[in-house]
Amino acid sequence: MQYSDLGKFIKFKRLQMGISLNKFATEAEIDPAILCRIENLKQGIKINVLESVARVFGMSPAGFLMEFENIKNDL
């Protein structure tokens, strides 16, 4: 599986929720600068960050990645 566009998906879902990058990062307990770099495809995502992001979306990491796989071509 290719996850190079995962940051775009995170940003897409975050904006759907109507939540700012800073607020989302705070809820996910990650540095806003890291989230910004991930969303702008300047940094890869580590598994612990993926787990935190999925949790904020109310999903498991596996469920989050499955949703990404289903929508990635539409991003």
Image: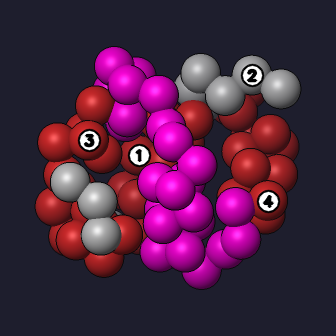
Q: Distance between the residues labelled 3 and 4?
A: 21 Å
- Comparing 36 with 45, the one in front is 45
- Comparing 31 with 36, the one in front is 31
Q: Which of marks 3 and 1 is in front?
A: 3
**Amino acid type of disc 4?**
Ala
The residue that label 1 is drawn on is: 11
Q: How far apart are marks 3 and 1 (CA)?
A: 13 Å
Disc nearer the start of the sequence (3/4):
3
What is the crowding at mark 3: few (fewer than 14 residues within 10 Å), some, or many (at least 20)? some
- Comparing 36 with 72, the one in front is 36
**Quarter of the image where the N terminus is located:** top right
**Amino acid type of disc 2?**
Gln
Q: In this view, does 16 lie to the left or right of 5?
A: left
Region rendered in magenta: 38-61
Disc nearer the start of the sequence (3/1):
1
Q: Residue 2: which numbered mark, if any?
A: 2
The residue that label 3 is drawn on is: 34
Q: How far apart are marks 2 and 3 (CA)?
A: 20 Å
- Residue found at x 29% / y 60%: 30
Query: Marks 4 and 2: in contact by CB < 8 Å?
Result: no
Q: Residue 63: which numbered mark, if any?
A: none
**Amino acid type of disc 1?**
Lys
Q: How far apart are marks 1 and 4 (CA)?
A: 18 Å
SS under mark 4: helix
Q: How far apart are marks 2 and 1 (CA)?
A: 17 Å
